[in-house]
Image (cartoon, rainbow, N blue to C red):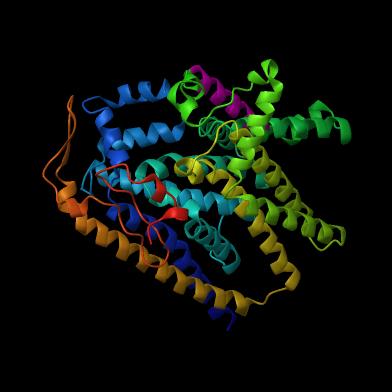
């Protein structure tokens, strides 16, 4: 009887585990390129990969930017065999890995085919895909290629600081340096905040715990190599001269960039504008900070009663601080709707981890029986099936509608984009999927910014 239950658990867990990569593979195979994706290909038509790498390095040398612009060169308007299909599959792999490593960081070990692990994994997928942050994965290939890559490498890097390795293999050292380097060039804010929190940790170890530098090095040797990777990555990033693009010119004007150095020349003016930026940027996520505060307070109350895992609480606090600092750093600009979800997607991930850690502790406290996990797994399979059907219906319908006209969009080297005679009825936006409101943007135009996010999506 026990063996039968274990086999059932393994089968259901495997089904749920495989659902996420199957979902992303299907989505990105039937997904049509957006106008931005096609325009990005036109920018470097006729150029080789080396030229693109050099261009991105002197533009915005982020790992996601490198990948998205290289992928754009080889991808086609709709799926085709060859390099296009390969890059669509790589994009699906990246999207899946972003969910996988977020789960690994949360549970503290690799995912096993057990209810508790796989339900956490599925929960992350559901949270991401049901909230507006899902546009990072569905709107454009350029979005997922850039920002899901950021989430993947960052969470993979953070796993080195979460997992208690029984034995540290020699191969872990170059791996943590590599992922530290990639994390440093994944986004402008995360590596800086990471180094700041590391500095706080070392001060705590030296001044409060009274540990010597030698003791810190011995206990955190692997993690120190990760810091080295971050430093190398930051050196690479800022030597690329991409900072100038972000802090001057049209980008700075469009998003009302506040240069920190202006604080010294006009502290009152800087403080007022910065204050207005913060409140403006809180418009869609203020609920997140309120719920986060409630979770932290209730968790601490349970910690004092020795009913709550102190390590989980510590990570909740660290991620809360990380998310807050991320918003404060991001508020050097005003984050408009067209940038909002993807730019703040790391914050959403941090918040989701805080929530899931809390749920995991509540499950332990309530001592939920195995039969409940079985029922939740069945419910998860039903929900996953509905999600898959909704996505497939909406995206296949749009793919079939625009496929013929999308083939009339051609990128001719040195001539930019050439569009043939298309049916104007097919040039509009995709209608959102019936249930979960997912959509991709049109290959024929940039789209209407007032319908850009799920907050304003066409009904």
**Residue 165 visible to an observer of this rendering:** no
Residue at image location 75% in from the left, 54% down from the top: 296
**Residue 343 visible to an observer of this rendering:** yes
Q: Residue furthest bottom?
A: 1
Residue 305: x and y in percent read: 87, 62
125 relative position to 197: left or right: left
260 relative position to 244: left or right: right
Tell me which segment is drawn in magenta. Answer: 224-239
Residue at image location 27% in from the left, 27% down from the top: 44
Q: Main secondary structure of the magenta part?
A: helix
235 relative position to 449: left or right: right
Is 450 placed above or below 226 here? Answer: below
In the picture, residue 159 is in which quadrant? top right
Residue at image location 57% in from the left, 84% down from the top: 1
Residue 41: x and y in percent read: 27, 34
Seen from the viewer's position, the closer of residues 105 and 47 is 47
Is 375 placed above or below 44 here? Answer: below
Residue 190: x and y in percent read: 59, 35
141 relative position to 379: left or right: left
Residue at image location 38% in from the left, 65% down from the top: 388
In the picture, residue 399 is in which quadrant? bottom left
Q: Is residue 174 magenta?
A: no
In the picture, the quarter occupied by the C terminus is bottom left
Q: Residue furthest left?
A: 421
Is 7 placed above or below 174 here? Answer: below
Q: Is residue 230 magenta?
A: yes
Callout count: 0
Seen from the viewer's position, the closer of residues 399 and 62 is 399
Residue 266: x and y in percent read: 68, 19
Q: Residue furthest top?
A: 265
């Amino acid at each position: 009887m026990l063996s039968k239950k274990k086999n059932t658990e393994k089968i259901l867990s495997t089904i749920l585990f495989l659902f996420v990569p199957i979902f992303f593979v299907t989505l990105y195979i039937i997904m049509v390129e957006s106008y931005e994706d096609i325009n990005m290909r036109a920018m470097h038509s006729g150029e080789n990969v080396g030229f693109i790498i050099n261009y991105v390095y002197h533009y915005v040398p982020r790992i996601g930017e490198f990948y998205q612009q290289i992928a754009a060169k080889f991808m086609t308007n709709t799926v085709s065999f060859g390099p296009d299909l390969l890059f669509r599959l790589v994009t699906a792999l990246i999207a899946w890995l972003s969910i996988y490593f977020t789960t690994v960081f949360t549970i503290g070990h690799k995912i096993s085919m057990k209810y508790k692990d796989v339900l956490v994994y599925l929960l992350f997928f559901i949270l991401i895909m049901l909230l507006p942050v899902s546009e990072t994965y569905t709107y454009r290939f350029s979005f997922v290629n850039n920002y899901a890559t950021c989430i993947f490498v960052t969470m993979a890097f953070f796993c080195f600081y979460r997992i208690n390795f029984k034995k540290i293999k020699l191969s872990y050292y170059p791996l943590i340096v590599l992922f530290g380097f990639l994390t440093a060039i994944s986004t402008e804010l995360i590596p800086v905040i990471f180094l700041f929190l590391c500095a706080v940790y070392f001060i705590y170890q030296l001044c409060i715990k009274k540990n010597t530098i030698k003791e810190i090095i011995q206990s955190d040797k692997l993690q120190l190599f990760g810091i080295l990777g971050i430093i190398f990555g930051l050196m690479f990033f800022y030597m690329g001269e991409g900072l100038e693009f972000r802090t001057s010119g049209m980008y700075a004007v469009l998003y009302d960039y506040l240069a920190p150095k202006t604080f010294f020349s006009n502290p009152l003016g800087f403080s007022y504008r910065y204050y207005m930026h913060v409140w403006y940027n809180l418009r869609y996520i203020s609920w997140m900070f309120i719920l986060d505060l409630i979770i932290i307070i209730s968790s601490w109350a349970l910690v004092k009663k020795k009913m709550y895992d102190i390590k989980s609480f510590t990570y909740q606090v660290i991620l809360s601080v990380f998310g807050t600092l991320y918003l404060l750093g991001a508020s050097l600009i005003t984050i408009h709707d067209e940038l909002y979800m993807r730019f703040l997607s790391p914050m959403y991930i941090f918040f989701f981890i805080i929530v899931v850690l809390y749920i995991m502790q509540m499950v332990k406290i309530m001592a939920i029986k195995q039969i409940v996990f079985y029922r939740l797994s069945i419910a998860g399979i039903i929900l996953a099936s509905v999600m898959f059907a909704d996505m497939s219906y909406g995206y296949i319908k749009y793919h079939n509608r625009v496929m013929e006209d999308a083939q009339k969009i051609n990128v001719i080297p040195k001539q930019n984009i050439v569009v043939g005679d298309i049916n104007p009825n097919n040039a509009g936006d995709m209608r959102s999927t019936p249930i979960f409101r997912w959509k991709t943007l049109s290959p024929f135009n940039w789209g209407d910014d007032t319908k850009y996010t799920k907050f304003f999506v066409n009904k």
